[in-house]
């Protein structure tokens, strides 16, 4: 049985000059579903991602998460929403002065997880992306690919019901992160991926959908 | 893992030092104001209103007069001084040569009225004079009118100037604290941004910064008061008769400092969550 996770209805965003950035975007993402939002550079995929994570308010349209409207709610609700989703941003957004373990555990710690759960889930996630050996080291020792994997580990550790990823065209994003995210859907997680194009490394399944932005 | 602003001490020393200097100035202003007030109280406590009585004043009239005097605003006490006593006092002060010879006593009987220092103002003295001089047995009313007026003007001017300076110094203290907190927050801007994106709430971003603001405020208050004490101690060698600020003054300085630290931290934290 699938439950509705995320619904966007006729979303539109304008820029500072009043010109449309995103127009008439509608979709529904259910638990266990995968949605690829694709489009060329400048098609405002990141703008749409910002709308979904409440970083930006849409000028028109409605959003809901688990059938609860997302807009018109305050800062507390924004925090609560973000604690229920895992996001891989286009930029890494890592805590540069903390260790790899601390970065992977950051979202769990903010959510107030117990120490043992935090430790188990974080090490499990780091093991999945092959960063366990470097867990106690600083970020400066990581390559850019490894930083992307650390972003993935942060999401995996969180075990969020909805995972959102804004993927680059780099190999690690397309060949490692995208397929790994798609496997999350089989565990009942909703996966929303923003990318220039659908990764060739991911097989088309009945739960996969694609929305193309112009 | 420490989140937010708890693990970095960026620029803390500089902020504390700058704030401590302003706190010292604030304390110095309060010290001068308190000493000025003390001086003013002493001046007012020494003021007397003298009522010269007619020689033919009856005991009933005197009783009525003392009742009137007792009902004056700020009345504290009165002293009944008869003409012989006045003569003897004057003799003690001026010597016998300046006083009329032949046993003639030109001094009248008098009542010397003392007011509580707070009420010993020009306005009160004038109103007492107007009220009492119309009484038949009162021949004249005397108080140091010119000196009281000029002293009051002087105290009022310095009091207002000191208040203005204290307000400016307090504003400077808030500004320094705010700039310091902003600097600390800016050093953590990227980290805060990531934490907000991951779902950090106001408590997780703001509380460490408020803790830091309070720490800076308390440290600046202690350092500033110590500096003030040092300068006050040095000034005693210059034979300046100034007393150190009272407990109330210290409390005001400390409260200003802590409030400045906390408020600037709250303002900074709020701007980070927007």
Image (cartoon, coloured by chain):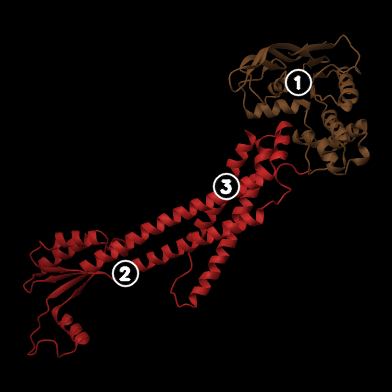
Image depth: mark 2 or mark 1 in front: 1
The kind of secondary structure element at disc 1 is loop
Please give left or right for residue B16 compared with residue A204 in the image: left
Mark 2 near mark 3, Cβ–Cβ under 8 Å? Answer: no
| Chain identity of mark 1 | A
A154 is higher (above) or lower (below) than A211: below
Residue placed under numbered mark 3 in the picture: B178
Q: CA distance from mark 2 to mark 1?
A: 82 Å
Residue B144, position as x, y percentages in the image: 22, 69
Sequence-wise, the earlier of marks 2 and 3 is 2
Seen from the viewer's position, the closer of residues B140 and A199 is A199
Q: Is residue A148 visible?
A: yes
Judged left or right of residue B191, residue B179 is left
Q: Is residue B26 left or right of residue B123?
A: right
The image's mark for residue A205 is none
Residue drawn at x 62%, y 40% as measured from the top left: B269
Helix, strand or loop status at disc 2: helix
Please name whichever residue, A43 or B215, is drawn nearer the observer in this view of the structure.
A43
Parent chain of label 3:
B
The residue carrying pointer 2 sits among few (fewer than 14), some (14 to 19) or many (20 or more) residues within 10 Å by Cα, namely: some
Mark 1 lies on residue: A41
Q: Secondary structure at mark 3?
A: helix
Are discs 2 and 1 both within one chain? Answer: no
Which colour is chain B painted? red
Q: Is residue A114 visible?
A: no
Q: Which chain identifier belongs to the brown chain?
A: A
Q: CA distance from mark 2 to mark 3?
A: 42 Å
**Nearest the camera: B146 or A208?**
A208
Nearer mark to the viewer, of 2 and 3: 3
Whether callout 3 and callout 1 share a subunit is answered no
Q: Seen from this angle, which residue lies furthest top?
A: A206
- Which quadrant of the figure contains the C terminus of chain A? top right
């Amino acid at each position: 049985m699938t439950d509705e996770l995320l619904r966007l209805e006729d979303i539109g965003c304008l820029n500072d000059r009043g010109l449309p950035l995103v127009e008439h975007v509608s979709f529904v993402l259910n638990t266990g579903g995968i949605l690829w939002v694709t489009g060329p550079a400048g098609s405002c995929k990141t703008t749409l991602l910002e709308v979904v994570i409440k970083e930006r308010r849409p000028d028109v349209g409605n959003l809901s998460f688990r059938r609860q409207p997302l807009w018109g709610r305050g800062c507390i609700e924004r925090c609560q929403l973000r604690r229920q989703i895992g996001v891989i941003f286009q930029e890494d957004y890592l805590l540069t002065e903390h260790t790899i373990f601390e970065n992977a555990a950051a979202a769990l710690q903010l959510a107030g997880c117990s120490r043992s759960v935090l430790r188990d889930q974080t090490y499990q996630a780091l093991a999945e992306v092959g960063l366990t050996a470097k867990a106690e080291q600083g970020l400066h020792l990581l390559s850019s690919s490894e930083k992307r994997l650390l972003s993935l580990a942060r999401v995996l550790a969180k075990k969020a019901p909805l995972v959102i990823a804004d993927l680059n065209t780099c190999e690690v994003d397309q060949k490692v992160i995208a397929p790994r995210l798609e496997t999350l859907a089989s565990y009942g997680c909703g996966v929303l991926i923003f990318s220039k194009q659908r990764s060739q490394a991911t097989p088309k399944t009945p739960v996969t959908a694609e929305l193309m932005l112009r | 893992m420490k989140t937010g602003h708890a693990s970095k001490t960026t620029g803390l020393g500089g902020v504390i030092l700058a704030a401590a200097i302003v706190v010292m100035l604030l304390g110095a202003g309060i010290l001068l104001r308190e000493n000025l007030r003390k001086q003013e109280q002493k001046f007012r406590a020494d003021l007397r209103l003298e009522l010269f009585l007619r020689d033919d004043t009856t005991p009933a009239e005197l009783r009525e007069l003392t009742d009137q005097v007792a009902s004056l605003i700020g009345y504290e006490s009165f002293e009944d001084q008869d003409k012989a006593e006045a003569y003897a006092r004057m003799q003690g002060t001026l010597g016998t040569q300046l006083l009329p010879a032949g046993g003639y006593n030109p001094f009248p009987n008098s009542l010397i009225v003392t007011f509580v220092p707070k009420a010993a103002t020009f306005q009160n003295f004038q109103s007492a004079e107007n009220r009492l001089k119309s009484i038949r047995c009162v021949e004249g009313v005397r108080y140091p009118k010119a000196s009281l007026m000029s002293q009051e003007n002087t105290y009022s001017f310095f009091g207002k100037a000191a208040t203005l300076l204290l307000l400016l110094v307090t504003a400077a203290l808030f500004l320094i604290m705010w700039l310091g907190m902003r600097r600390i927050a800016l050093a953590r801007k990227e980290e805060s941004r990531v934490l907000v994106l991951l779902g950090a709430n106001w408590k997780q971003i703001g509380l460490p910064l408020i803790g830091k603001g309070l720490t800076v405020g308390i440290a600046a208050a202690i350092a500033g008061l110590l500096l003030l004490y040092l300068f006050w101690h040095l000034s005693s060698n210059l034979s300046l008769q100034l007393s150190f600020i009272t407990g109330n003054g210290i409390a005001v300085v400390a409260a200003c400092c802590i409030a400045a630290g906390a408020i600037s931290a709250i303002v900074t934290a709020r701007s980070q969550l927007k």
